């Protein structure tokens, strides 16, 4: 049995890619995309016809509408390969605008429904700002399921749970990156590996908190830098993994043991916490890593959205 198959015994495996032609070989249940992954895909020759075709079909429409049609088009292709759900992201430039995020999410879902895809197969990705979490709260009440992304701080996870969000994506690798860079020459890779990896510890804390208090929000570890981080989170509800790391897991026969267990979480001594807006903003501000990585992530996704628009305009 491959390490990938062993992992699937404990965790739902999700492919983290816009490259739907790579998906089938790994047999993931779900797939996630973001503006950066879509941009990377459309720069490849095999996806140019899809880009041109979608742009031509919607010529003369507002650019934001063309982009949403492009994202949904990729989502529809992905859904032909995976049996579960696809995550499609709202423009990161709306991360601090609750009403605009809701409107854009509703439009993306409408495009999927017009193509014959039910709400049970789509997650709307939204940055886990306070405004994004409140948008997700409203969307969940409408039956539009959400995936809250760019999640780095415990307070973000708690607020998402309180909002009844379907799924969160804590970013393991980006947390690891920040702590490694911050430590500089004093970083000890061995001491900070496996269960001691700062990104792994963050996801484990969230997982244990949710399971202890019966919070139904799904935890999906994301943004991995190495196989060790993935193995250390075996048992997490879902893990979204790049094709490169999926291939490494598939090529390995190393055993995989369950590391996160809901029964153990139930028995742990964990304190309940709650955040209103002021407390949330203060807690996030107190976490330098989360503040830095959230801002950086929004900027990067926004920049790639601009690049995608430029590619469409150049056609």
Image: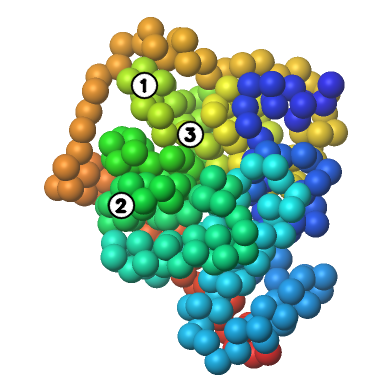
Q: Secondary structure at mark 2?
A: helix
Q: Quadrant of residue 135?
A: bottom left
Q: Is 208 placed left or right of 187 in the picture?
A: left
Q: Secondary structure at mark 1?
A: loop
C-alpha separation, residue under disc 2 versus residue under disc 1: 21 Å
C-alpha separation, residue under disc 2 versus residue under disc 3: 20 Å
- Residue for point 70% across, 27% down: 8
**Crowd rating for badge 2 (residues with CA inside 10 Å; few <14, some 14–19, many 20+):** some
Q: Is 111 placed left or right of 17 in the picture?
A: left
Seen from this angle, which residue lies furthest top? Answer: 267
Q: Is residue 172 visible?
A: yes
Q: Position of residue 7 (x, y in %)?
A: 69, 25
* Residue indicated by mark 2: 138
Q: Quadrant of residue 257?
A: top right
**Crowd rating for badge 1 (residues with CA inside 10 Å; few <14, some 14–19, many 20+):** few
* Residue indicated by mark 3: 219
> Who comes first in sequence, dot 2 or dot 1?
2
- Residue for point 69% across, 21% down: 9
Q: Is residue 182 visible?
A: no
Q: Nearer the viewer, residue 45 or 71?
A: 71
> Who comes first in sequence, dot 1 or dot 3?
1
Quadrant holding the N terminus: top right
The answer to whether 265 is drawn above or below residue 191 in the figure is above
Q: Is 66 placed left or right of 79 in the picture?
A: left
* Residue indicated by mark 1: 214
Q: Secondary structure at mark 3?
A: strand
Q: Quadrant of residue 283?
A: top left
The answer to whether 236 is drawn above or below residue 159 in the figure is above
Give the foreground label among 2 and 1: 2
Q: Are marks 2 and 3 in contact (CB under 8 Å)?
A: no
Count of numbered badges drawn on the protein: 3
């Amino acid at each position: 049995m491959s390490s990938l198959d062993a992992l699937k015994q404990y965790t739902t495996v999700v492919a983290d890619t816009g490259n739907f032609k790579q998906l089938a070989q790994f047999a993931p249940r779900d797939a996630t995309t973001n503006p950066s992954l879509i941009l990377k895909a459309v720069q490849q020759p095999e996806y140019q016809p899809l880009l041109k075709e979608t742009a031509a079909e919607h010529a003369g429409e507002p650019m934001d509408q063309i982009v949403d049609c492009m994202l949904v088009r990729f989502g529809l292709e992905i859904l032909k390969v995976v049996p579960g759900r696809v995550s499609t992201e709202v423009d990161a430039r709306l991360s601090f605008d609750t009403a605009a995020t809701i409107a854009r999410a509703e439009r993306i879902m409408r495009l999927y429904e017009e193509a014959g895809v039910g709400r049970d197969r789509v997650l709307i990705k939204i940055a886990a700002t306070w405004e994004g979490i409140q948008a997700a709260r409203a969307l969940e009440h409408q039956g539009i399921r959400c995936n809250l992304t760019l999640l780095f701080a415990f307070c973000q996870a708690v607020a998402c749970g309180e909002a009844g969000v379907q799924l969160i994506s804590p970013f393991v690798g980006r947390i690891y990156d920040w702590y490694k860079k911050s430590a500089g020459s004093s970083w000890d890779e061995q001491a900070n590996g496996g269960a001691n990896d700062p990104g792994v510890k963050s996801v484990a804390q969230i997982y244990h908190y949710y399971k202890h208090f019966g919070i139904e929000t799904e935890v999906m570890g994301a943004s991995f830098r190495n196989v060790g981080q993935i193995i250390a989170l075996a048992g997490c509800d879902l893990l979204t993994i790049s094709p490169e790391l999926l291939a490494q897991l598939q090529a390995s026969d190393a055993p995989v043991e369950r590391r996160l267990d809901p029964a153990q979480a139930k028995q742990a001594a964990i304190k309940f916490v709650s955040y209103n807006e002021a407390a949330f903003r203060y807690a996030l501000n107190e976490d330098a890593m989360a503040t830095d990585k959230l801002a950086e992530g929004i900027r990067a996704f926004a920049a790639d959205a601009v690049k995608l628009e430029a590619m469409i305009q150049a056609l």
